[in-house]
Amino acid sequence: MPAPDKNYLQVLSDLENWGSYEISAQPRDISKLEGIRLLLKDLGNPENNFKIIHIAGTNGKGLTASIMSRLLCVQGFATGCYTSPHLTDIRERITLNDQFVARDTFTQITSIVLNIARGYEGNPYLSYFDVLTAIAFYAFKTGKMEWVVLETGLGGRADSTNVTAKELCILTRVGLDHQEVLGSNLLEIAAEKIGITRSEIPVIVAEQVLELKPWLSEQFRKTKVPAFFVEDFFEAEFPENKFALNSSSKPRLACIQTSLCAMQVLFDGSSLQKKNWFEAAQKVKLSGRLDLRENVIWAKRSHVFKTMLLDGGHNHDALEALVEYLSTNKLVPCTLIFGMAADKLDVVLRTPLKELCEKADNLIFTPVPSPRTATPEMLENFIVESGGFEHSPEIKYATTVEEAMEAALLSSEKPVVVAGSFYLVGEVMQILGNECVT
């Protein structure tokens, strides 16, 4: 193995040794940011070298971040983007001008950051996400980025990313997720999310459930945050751009509209600029999010899946969007490969999960590659507790993701839907050989 590859694998191992919320479901004390602040100070405060757009919300953060990054590049700026989670390669999280951070650059920067972090000997405590955030900031400084788009990892107010000045904030749709950390209802969760905002710094607000808009308006008024609500602002600023509802899912439309509004607030674009933004935004796609693929080759089995949909959405709103997408795009009946983390099996998911399973003639329940995984038995029991199926799907249990894919071969003329977890989607992509290699 060449030395650079060996070094890269070593820093990946060192990073994993820090432990992450994604693996343990145990976050650090979200009221404390001393660790990330000290680490950035000792790195020379790399986060002060570029302009920042900060994104919080429950659904749509990743796609909105990717669209914003692309539009800033179209505008002529060197642009970095920091998102999570990744599917097959950690470098997916850190892009410079739409390209993954180079492997040797990631290796060098991670070594520098980890050496400093180890010196603290646990005081102050640094989470995995703290360390990775610092790596991203240092990479953006090294790459001489002019703008950086940051997606929060969890919440907003005390997220590792919320330690910078910023030019603009974006709030995507707020829903129920991570209630054990962020709050038991939408208002409590929204209060954490809008913790990224700053007085006099504008915020773009995607369409929210009805109960949130007046509350958000009042909060922003009290904190002197200029707020632009997409459902009002988009129609006024982009009247010539009418979306064809059958060409994009509603979640995708929301991300495009939100991003276009953000660009208009920042740059007050001309008609030509708006047209260019509109065209560029429509071309941005994100792997693993309502990701529809045709003629997917599984070389190991010498097989082609005619149609495959990959979607890692795992909360109520995301699952509802998936159900709607399947119907709108005539992907029923399907074969459903489903896996999820056990701690995600909240009662609010029973209805959308049952609706999802009703779209399938074949249900294949599988564990996901995470210590937090639900067993196939847990998944079936959780869903049927909301009532029996209206049809009689064939139900199978798989012991591994690859076994689940093999079971899907028996009915692969039907659309194959892989859903419930980004761990599951990432594993399927790796099995298919669709790894992110640059």
Image: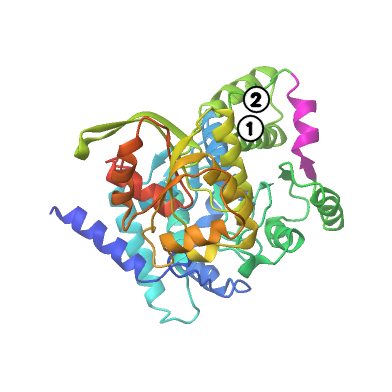
Residue 421 left/right relative to 413: right
Q: Quadrant of the C terminus?
A: top left
Q: Name the foreground residue: 404 vs 166.
A: 404
Q: Quadrant of residue 261?
A: top right
Three-letter amino acid code at the position of disc 1: Leu
Residue 10 left/right relative to 227: left
Name the disc covering residue 245, or none.
2
Which of the two discs, 2 and 1, sits closer to the camera?
A: 2
Label 2 vs 1, first from the N-terminus: 2
Residue 400 left/right relative to 19: left
Name the disc covering residue 376, or none.
none
Image coordinates of residue 431 in percent, x first then y, are 28, 46
Check contact, mark 2 vs mark 1: CB within 8 A.
Answer: yes
Q: Name the foreground residue: 366 vs 263.
A: 366
Three-letter amino acid code at the position of disc 2: Leu
Residue 56 left/right relative to 311: right
Image coordinates of residue 239 in percent, x first then y, are 76, 21
- Numbered range of the magenta stretch: 227-239
Q: Please indicate, yes or no, whether residue 178 appears anywhere in the rendered image.
A: yes
Image coordinates of residue 276 in percent, x first then y, are 59, 21
User: In the image, what residue occupies the spot 28% across and 44% down?
Assistant: 406
